[in-house]
Image (cartoon, rainbow, N blue to C red):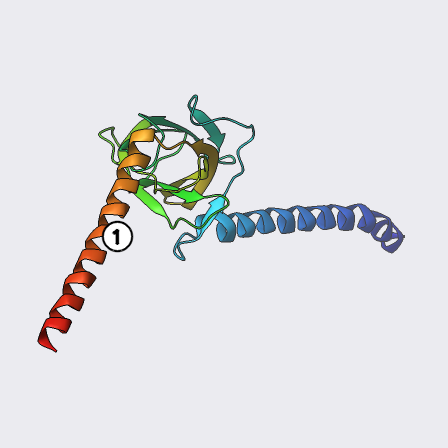
Amino acid sequence: MYRAEDDNARPPLLNLLIVVTLITIVVSLYYLIDYYLVRDGSNGKVTWFAPNQSCELSHAPCSAELGRFGRVTLSLEGDISPLTPLGIHVVTEGVTPEGVEVDFIGRHMDMGVKRSMLATTDAPSAERQQWLGEGQLGFCSSATMAWRAQIIVTTERGRLGSWFDFDSHPQASTAEQLESSVNQLFRNERRSRSAHDSDRRSGS
C-alpha cells in the first residue's frame, strides 16, 4: 500500500525536477552567450548593434541603442567636406565607457580608416557622459562621397559599436587647391626632367 502511494507521488516530483533542470539550462546558456558575445572584449572584437532608424548625420545628431547596454548619440560640427577639420561630439547614456572612438570609412570606396580617439572630462561614474574630439575626412575626386561613421565604445563588458551613414561634398576651394597642387607637381617634374636632359646633352 505504501509502495503504491510512493509510485503515485513520483510523477509530480519528477516533473518539477525536469522543469527546474530546464530553467537552469536556459539561464546557463543565456549567461554563456552573454559572456562570449559581449563581455569577452579581450580579443578586440566589436559587438555591433544596427541603428534602429535611418538618420542623416550631416543634418542632425543621430542616436542608436547598444542593445540593453546603453545608448550613444553622435553629432558632427563644421563643414562635412574632405580635408576640413571636423568636430566630433558623442553622448553616452546608460553605459560606463573606458574609451570612445569614431572611425570614418568609405561605404563604396576603400578610403582607409580615419580614426579619432575622443576624450571626456565627465566623471567615470556619470550616467550621461560627453566625449569630444576632432577628425577629418579623406579626399575623393567624386562630387559626392558616401561615408560611414562607426562609434566604438570600450567598456568592461567589451567593445560595443553602432554606425551612421552620411555623404560629403567637397568645397570648390578645396578641390581647386588640390588640382592646383597636382598641376604644380607635374610642372616641377617636367622642368626637372628637361634640366636633366639638357645636362646630359651638354656633357656628351
Query: Of helix, strand and loop, which one carries label 1?
Result: helix
Q: Quadrant of the C terminus?
A: bottom left
Is residue 8 left or right of 96 when viewed as pictured?
A: right
**Type of amino acid at the residue the image marks with label 1:** Phe
Depth check: 66 or 94 in front? 66
Residue 123 vs residue 201: left or right? Answer: right
Rendered position, 89 above or below 116: above
Q: Nearer the viewer, residue 84 or 194?
A: 194
Q: Residue at x 32, y 28 (%)?
A: 129
Label total for image:
1
Badge 1: residue crowd in 10 Å (few <14, some 14–19, many ≥20): few
Viewer-nearest residue: 202 or 83 = 202
Which residue is more in the foreground, 191 or 125?
Answer: 191
- x and y, in percent, of residue 16 in the image: 73, 45
Residue in view at x 71 percent, y 49 percent: 17
Q: Is residue 202 left or right of residue 69?
A: left
Residue 29 position within the rendered picture, expressed as x and y whole percent measured from the top left: 60, 51
* Observer able to see residue 128: no
The residue labelled by disc 1 is 186
Residue at horizontal 47%, vertical 48%?
109
Q: Is residue 33 above or below residue 135?
A: below
Whether residue 121 appears in this view of the structure is yes
Q: Residue 107 at what x, y percent from top left?
A: 49, 43
